[in-house]
Image (cartoon, rainbow, N blue to C red):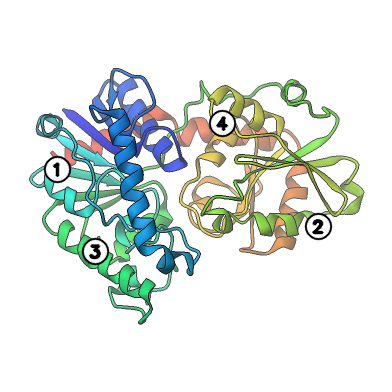
Amino acid sequence: MKILHISARDCNGGANRAGFRIHEAQVNHGLKSRFFAQQNSIISPHSFGPRSKIGSKIGAQIRSGIDRWRYAKTISKEGRECSVNWCPGSLIPQSEIEEADIINLHFINEAVMPNNLMQLKGKKIIWTLHDMWPFSGIEHYSEESDRSLWASGELQGKSRFDRLNHAVLRRKLKAYQRLDLKIACPSKWLAKLARKSVLFSGKDVHVIPNPINGDTYKPVIKSHAKELLNLNPSKRHILFGVDPTASNSFRKGGDILFEAIKRLPTSLRNDVEVLTFGGDGECFEINGFIGHHIGSFKDEMSLRIVYSAADVFVAPSRQDNLPNTILEAFSCGTPAVAFSIGGMTDMITHNRNGYLAQPYCPSDLAHGIQSILDTNSDVNAYAKETALAEYNPSRIAKMYLDLYHNFA
């Protein structure tokens, strides 16, 4: 059986990285898997991109630029994470499509547009969802109400945003009806929404988590990790991944975390520091708590050190699927604190490998952070155990293989 994965990129961005990890897990499990990325960066015999990398990158930037320019006023006023995907995308080599028994789609923005999906007509397609965009209009995350566009299919208002959102959803509906399609969702939360959606109603929807490689992400002795980052080994550290310039910064909840830090007991000021990583940043202070921005990291060895240096990782997202950051933290033996929303409840077992706070309560988030900081090493061990047992790449590869066989 030959599998062809299709994604916008192979490493930049959480969704693209998760898709490539699924492919890697399948290759290591003995499956004949190939990975096509519109913008490919990873050198591997099992992955490839368009024949002209420069032309592909320029083309993707032009298409994205046209969409942003044409609909800038509509989208910017809403302040949401959106992809219009109106301009035609690049075609995947037809020979690769013809040879594949299964096509596995991932985050396809800037890679495959709704009109390009007709190139896949007649093929058996699995679509691994990394957010709500495949079953919504232009939004990557939307309100979860049954009255929302993705659930009702009905025009929500008369604004330009509403009309554009509705038009793209109708375009997707027309394209999907011609495809032999099954859905894989990394979290139970996303699967529930997909089943209720207009676009995927009646489709087979399966829950298959994303994998994390425990050999790549494994604990570094905490004191050594702190020293490598020029941190005081005697301090305890709260870690948060943030890029304040990114379109998803509001959804990621950094503002709630900073409010939670203000609610921590002042007695912790001399013992606890805050760490941020990702994007640009600088040192800061929150109500007497010292904060360090330790930089942006792409390589996995550096990330392994960052997660190992932390005593608790905080993911205060307002909405999220199955964030890589929590899996990476767990695999390095670092517990996590998050709100009891989305895919967080799949990963975090309350008071075992982390803490699930009442959504969007800064005081309970602060309580969770303090609770984890005050726990013994058992919580660290259980975090690592969770990563090894539930998100083992071999286990995930087998789940996909079973899905492929049931489809073939």
* Label of residue 201 in the image: 3
| Amino acid at pointer 3 | Ser
Q: Label 4: which residue?
A: 331
The percent position of residue 280, horizontal first and vertical second, equals 64, 41
- Above or below — where is 321 with respect to 145? above
Number of residue marks? 4
For the N terminus, the quadrant is top left
Q: Label 2: which residue?
A: 262
| Amino acid at pointer 2 | Lys
Tell me which numbered mark, 2 or 3, is placed earlier along the sequence.
Answer: 3
- In front: mark 1 or mark 4? 1
CB contact under 8 Å: marks 4 and 2 = no
Observer-nearest of 62 and 333: 62
* Label of residue 124 in the image: 1
Residue 51 visible here: yes
Q: Secondary structure at mark 1?
A: strand
Q: Secondary structure at mark 4?
A: helix
Observer-nearest of 104 and 60: 60
Cα separation, mark 1 vs mark 3, equals 18 Å
Cα separation, mark 3 vs mark 4, equals 35 Å
Residue 83 visible here: no
Cα separation, mark 1 vs mark 4, equals 34 Å
Cα separation, mark 2 vs mark 1, equals 52 Å
The percent position of residue 300, horizontal first and vertical second, equals 54, 25
Seen at 73% across and 49% down, the residue is: 369
Query: Around disc 4, counting alpha carbons within 10 Å, would you say few (fewer than 14), some (14 to 19), or many (20 or more)?
Result: many
- Above or below — where is 187 with respect to 10? below
